[in-house]
Image: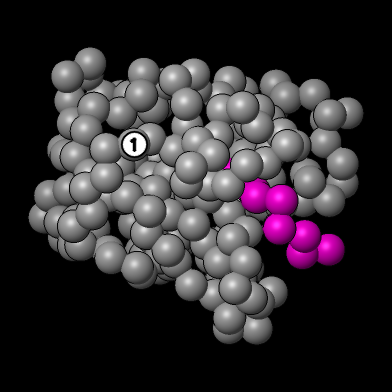
Amino acid sequence: MYAFQTSRFQSHEPKWLDCQKFPRSALSAADAHWLLDTGSLTAHLRRLSHGHFHVEVLAQRWQIPRLSERRLLGMGDRHWGLVREVRLHCNRQPWVYARSVLPATSLVGRLDRLRTLDSRPLGHLLFTDPHMSRDRYEICKVPAAALDESVLAPYSEDLWGRRSRFLLSGHPIMVSEIFLPAFRPW
């Protein structure tokens, strides 16, 4: 298990907004295509990179998630979750930063296996689970200043992100994905 104490975002959290309330004029057609796609991002990235895809685990630790994450997951203020932060690489370039929150109360029974993902992609496990459903996305423009430069490298541009709550047999899990500057699939 990985146990880094740093968070990949600085003290302020991105302002997530329900995708149906986000002004469409703020999104290009290409950005909207990726931000609002309901398929497996992992599967899309594997296809786009012709198999040159890998997951780099930045951190995996037990902690109390951020306030908006707890609200999205229906967690109490003192409830712990397994927080996993990774970069998804395609063709040796980091394309996506992903942060997943798995409440301790969700990691029971057959879902206990999610505690030990290592470098396996969570997306693959989610989309192959016959008992999975997903809420609609929340999206945001992540200010470059919110990124932890020591881990994610200094970016000068704001980055698009999305997150959603998955339900696996009724147990919630949150996945947020920030599309990094190297992500240019078009």
Could you tell me residue 16's position as x and y percent? Answer: 57, 25
Colour scheme shown: one colour
Identify the residue at image location x=22%, y=33%: 63
Tag 1: residue type? Thr
Q: Residues in magenta?
A: 175-186
Could you tell me residue 54's position as x and y percent? Answer: 48, 72
On screen, 56 above or below 133? below
Identify the residue at image location x=19%, y=40%: 62
Identify the residue at image location x=47%, y=32%: 9
Q: Left or right of 13: which side holds 139?
A: right
Q: Is residue 122 magenta?
A: no
Give whichever of 107, 170 is nearer the camera. Answer: 107
Could you tell me residue 137's position as x and y percent? Answer: 58, 37
Identify the residue at image location x=87%, y=41%: 28
Residue under pointer 1: 6
Quadrant in which the C terminus appears = bottom right
Label 1: how many Cα within 10 Å (few below 14, some 14–19, many 20+)? few
Res. 97 in view:
yes
Give whichever of 3, 47 is nearer the camera. Answer: 3
On screen, 21 above or below 180? above
Give whichever of 168, 2 is nearer the camera. Answer: 2
